[in-house]
Image (cartoon, rainbow, N blue to C red):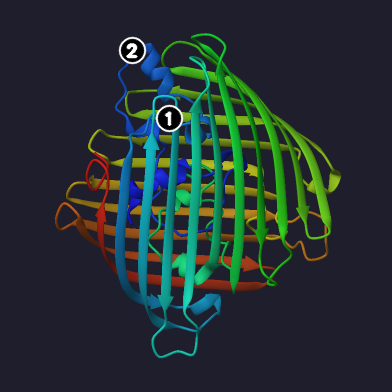
Amino acid sequence: MKTRSFAFLFCLAPIGLTATVAIAQQAPAYSRTNDTTMDSSTASTTQQDLKPMWVDAAVNPREQSYFDAGLSASYGRDSAVNNIPNLSSQFSNLQGHIGIASVGRRFSSAFSHDATILQFPGSNLDLQQYHWTTVSLNGIASRRTTWGLTGANAYGADSARASSSLSLSSVSNTPIDNGTVQAGLISGNVLRQYVNFVVDHELSETRAFTFGANAGFHNFLGAAPSTQQYNVNMAVRQYFGPHVLAGIRGDGVRQNFGIGQCTTAAVTAFTTVQLTESLRADGSAGPVFGSAQCTGNYQYQGVLSAQSVRGSRVYIGTSRKRGNGAISGSLWETSGYGGVRLGNPRRFTVDVNSGYTSYHGGTLTAASSDVSGYFVSGEYRRRLSQYLEWDFTVRHFQRTVSSVDLARTVFFVTFTWSKQHGGAYGR
């Protein structure tokens, strides 16, 4: 299941939580608005394209009704099976995807499920699996008011996640941020659940108000203390012409890390500038207030991205933000990331993506040691027919916990059949 098919999956993910569901790694997918060629002569169209990502991903009634299905088979090698250093083995992988969406005049609903089954031939390890299910509801309450409600559940082994071909967009804090991927690997199974609600109201043709509430739960099933996070946020944004948006957002967050608790509030100024027809800059920054043990007193994010009409992409970014519990004991994450895609999606593409993140544990518990690591991925994908393609993928994960280095390299070949609305790449 490739990037286009799973761009839909991310658009259902709970962005208010900055959904760091560590499902799998591949080329980052842009938000659905970025996939639209911008018409600089139409202010309203451009302003819609500049809608903040956390709103656009959660409130998206513009989809058409469709049914998606896909199946892929992979074979490759893992240098650290089940995240155990130096335990290498070949593996075979089978994945399935199904997505259903129904869009009416004022209400839409969508359901998707992705399953990965992983087997290590010749080893004593049990069959590995990973499942990711999302349900989304969107509605138009009035001419100026829209809302979105999303629930998501992920369960399974990190080994199956890391060797699958699911889209990196389901992991990221934004559609083009691979910050928390590389250190998300742990031994054993994990259970992650999210729920997110957003209401967006246009106060005028150039001003809008957003209210959101969300929660996330991470159960590491004995490998580490469970974590929970609850967030309430409000934002006001203003369009200054067809190519510039700016606004301010307030967040209140409660985090539970085992027996530790952290309560903070943040005020963030954000802006989006469409520099050219294909080049876009997103930035945000602001102070954070709250518990002293939460270690952070400011946060920021900056992303510069470009996409051509034919599908080539490039992005670079950096961020410092509150952790969401996907990494046990992590309160703050400081990341740098970047990537490029070349080629034509209808024929072949080459993707290279990487990111480095430092996770700050704070002083909540003695086990809250800092973690850092990086992730590098390369992929060549080629179309064989309208519904069939093959690709070769290489990924390397490196993380450091205190003085212990943990590395993992995975490479595999995948054959994928997919039948999606509007064609294999949604075009």
* Nearer mark to the viewer, of 1 and 2: 1
- In the rendered structure, the answer to whether residue 235 lies left or right of residue 123 reads right
Q: How far apart are the alpha carbons under marks 1 and 2?
A: 20 Å
What residue appears at the point 65 percent right and 42 percent down from the top-left corner? 321
Q: 167 or 180: which is nearer to us?
A: 167
- In the rendered structure, the answer to whether residue 237 lies left or right of residue 223 reads left
Q: In the drawing, what numbered circle is on residue 61?
A: 1
| Mark 1–mark 2 CB contact (< 8 Å) | no
Rendered view: 98 above or below 202: below
Q: Is residue 162 visible?
A: yes
Could you tell me residue 310's position as x and y percent?
22, 37
Residue 393 occupies quadrant: bottom left
The residue that disc 2 covers is 42
Could you tell me residue 237's position as x and y percent?
57, 19
Quadrant for the N terminus in the image:
bottom left
Query: What amino acid is at disc 2?
Result: Thr
- In the rendered structure, the answer to whether residue 370 lies left or right of residue 276 reads right
SS type, badge 1 = loop
Seen as rendered, the residue at the extreme left is 385
